[in-house]
Amino acid sequence: MEKGILVVISGFSGAGKGTVVKKILEKSSDYCLSVSMTTRNPRPGEVEGKDYFFVTREKFEQTIKENGFVEYAEFVGNYYGTPRAYVEQKINEGKNVILEIEIQGAMNIKKIYPESVLLFITPPTAEELERRLKDRGTETDDVIAGRLSRAYEEAAGIDEYDFVIVNDDLDRCVEDVLETIESAKREPVRVKAFTESLKEDLKKYHK
C-alpha cells in the first residue's frame, strides 16, 4: 500500500483555513484530519473528538512529558498539539493527513517530517482579514486586536512554507489546494523510495 503524506495547513486566524479543510474532507476520501488537542474552550458547534480534544492544562502538560505530541505550541494563552500515534497510523494506512496548525508547530513538523507539504492560506488583504474576524461575532474587540497583531508577527514566517494560497473565492481556493498537493506528491523529496529503487534497477544498464 502506498503511504499517505503529511499536509500542514496554516494561516492567520480568520483566513478561512478551517472551512477550506472541511471542504477538502467532503470532496476526497483520500484525506483525513488530524484532530488536535487543546486547552482552549470549545466554540459554539464544536464537537469533542471531532474538532478538537478539549483537555485541561494539566492533562496537556502530562502528555508533553510522555512525548505524546508530534508538535505542540502555545497560542494566545492556550496550548495546541498534534497527537503522534494518530498521525503515523493514518499515513501508514495510505491517508493524506491534514494538520491545521500554527506557524510555530508547522516549522517543527518540517524538521521531523521533511517530506511533508506546508501550505499557508491567507485572505487577499489585511482589511479583509479584519472584516472576517469581526463578522465571526464570537470574540471581543480586544481579542480581535490581539489576533491581528499576531497575524503581523506570523507574516514573517510565510517564506518558510512550500506554497501560499489566497482564499478569495472558497471553491477556487479548495481546488488550488488539492491541485497543489497532488503536484507536490510527485516532487523528488516525496517519492524518494521510488527513485532510489529506479536508480538501483538502472545499474545493470550502466557501462
Image (tube, helix red, strand yellow):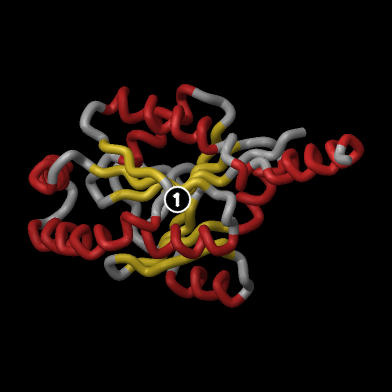
Dot 1 amino acid type: Tyr
Q: Is residue 90 left or right of residue 160?
A: right
Residue 77 seen in render: yes
Hey, which quadrant is residue 178 in on the image?
top left
Determine whether 62 is above or below 11 in the image.
Answer: below
Q: Is residue 124 left or right of residue 51?
A: left
Neighbourhood count class around disc 1 (C-alpha, 10 Å): few under 14, some 14–19, many 20 upward? many
Q: Residue furthest bottom?
A: 65
Question: Which quadrant, please, contains the N terminus?
Answer: top right
Q: Is residue 120 left or right of residue 122?
A: right
Question: Which quadrant, please, contains the C terminus?
Answer: top right
Residue 137 seen in render: no
x then y, percent, for residue 189:
61, 47
x then y, percent, for residue 93:
71, 38
Q: Secondary structure at mark 1?
A: strand
Residue at 31% across, 55% down: 158
Residues 174 and 183: in front is: 183
Residue that carries the numbered disc 1 in the rendered image: 52
x then y, percent, for residue 140:
11, 56
Residues 67 and 63: in front is: 67
Q: Residue furthest right?
A: 204
Hey, which quadrant is residue 121 in on the image?
top left
x then y, percent, for residue 187:
57, 39
